[in-house]
Image: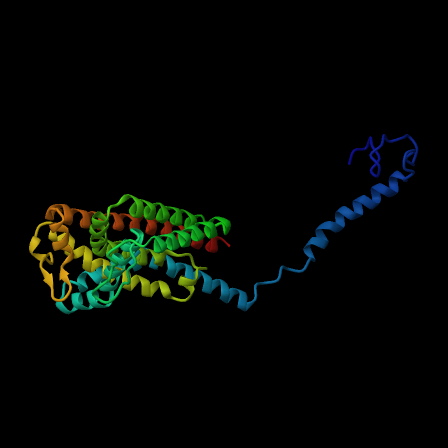
Amino acid sequence: MNASTCIRCGGPRAEGPECPRCGVVYARAESRAASQREAEPSSAASAPPAPEASAAALFARRQALGEARTELWLARLAVPGTLLASWLLVHTQWGRFLARTLFGMWLHELGHAVGAWLCGFPAFPGPWFTPVADERSPLFALALMGGLGWAVWRGWTGDQRGLAAAGIGVLSLQLVCTLGLSGRAAHTLITFSGHAGCLVFGAALMAMFFVPPEHKLHRDWLRWGFLVIGAAGFADTFDLWWRARTDYSVIGFGEVEGRGATDASVLVREGWSVPTMTGRYAGIGVLCLLALAALQFRHLRRTRAALETLEAE
């Protein structure tokens, strides 16, 4: 309190008992202010304590912390562990048969089909064989272009930049493959896309494990099924071509009864050398593993940050 000013209005203090500006009696105003200051600590001390969190709230917090810690553990080990288990599996006779029949074969045939679609050829992936049209279909190519254009528009207007970027990339690839490749070069690419597609799609399925917790794949446990399918298919194909760098006998040259030459025989017949073919397949596999490692590192950082936020609350 400043003795030279009025405690009520802050004006200059006069000589008399009252303030000429607001009319308050100095002594009464100062006595009232002193009483209020003395009452403040007691009122603060008598204030009711803050309510404690309910049992349901505490349980929900413990549940969220437990899930976040589990997710951090899975972010470190799930994908590498499943990939390692699949690699060990394909080193057994029955394990390789199961991995190739149940998972790798379908990704392989899907690779042929997607390669054909990008080049403008209608195709349908089937078990152990993918029928591909002999000639390009302009109508099919335009329909695919329209679908990719719609995906780009949907991603852009829906603020899904990842979908828009992926659509632009695939659309650009389709234009190059459809308009820039001759029929013979396109069929060579389609042949190469079998094993290459198995590697790419296998890695993409494994990468789906890194979706955020609010995503449908995470909530419905679908990411676990995609992880197993992708790891088994990838391990089978990558192990084959990694060993083929030093042992050409593991490559499936020859003829398939009723189907014609194998993919490797067709590529060599088209002028590819065996080292070139094995190097390209192995290189695609290594690039997929590097991309998968980068996505896992990003997912690990995001998961750790979410856990630290929960622990700080």
Residue 73, how many percent across, how many down?
A: 34, 58
Whole-percent x and y of residue 8?
84, 39
In the picture, measured across the screen, residue 11 lies left or right of residue 191, that is: right
Residue 25, relative to residue 291: is it above or below? above
In this picture, residue 111 sits left or right of residue 268: right
- x, y percent for residue 209: 35, 58
Q: Of residues 128 and 44, which is closer to you in this image?
A: 128
Residue 189 position (above or below residue 53): above
Percent coordinates x, y for residue 47 in the rendering: 69, 57
Give the vertical position of 7 relative to 97 (above or below).
Answer: above
- Count the marks: 0
Task: Give the camera-side residue of 91 and 297.
Answer: 91
Classify the position of the N terminus by image quarter.
top right
Visible residue check, residue 78: yes
Front-most of residues 205 and 3:
205
Q: Is residue 80 visible?
A: no
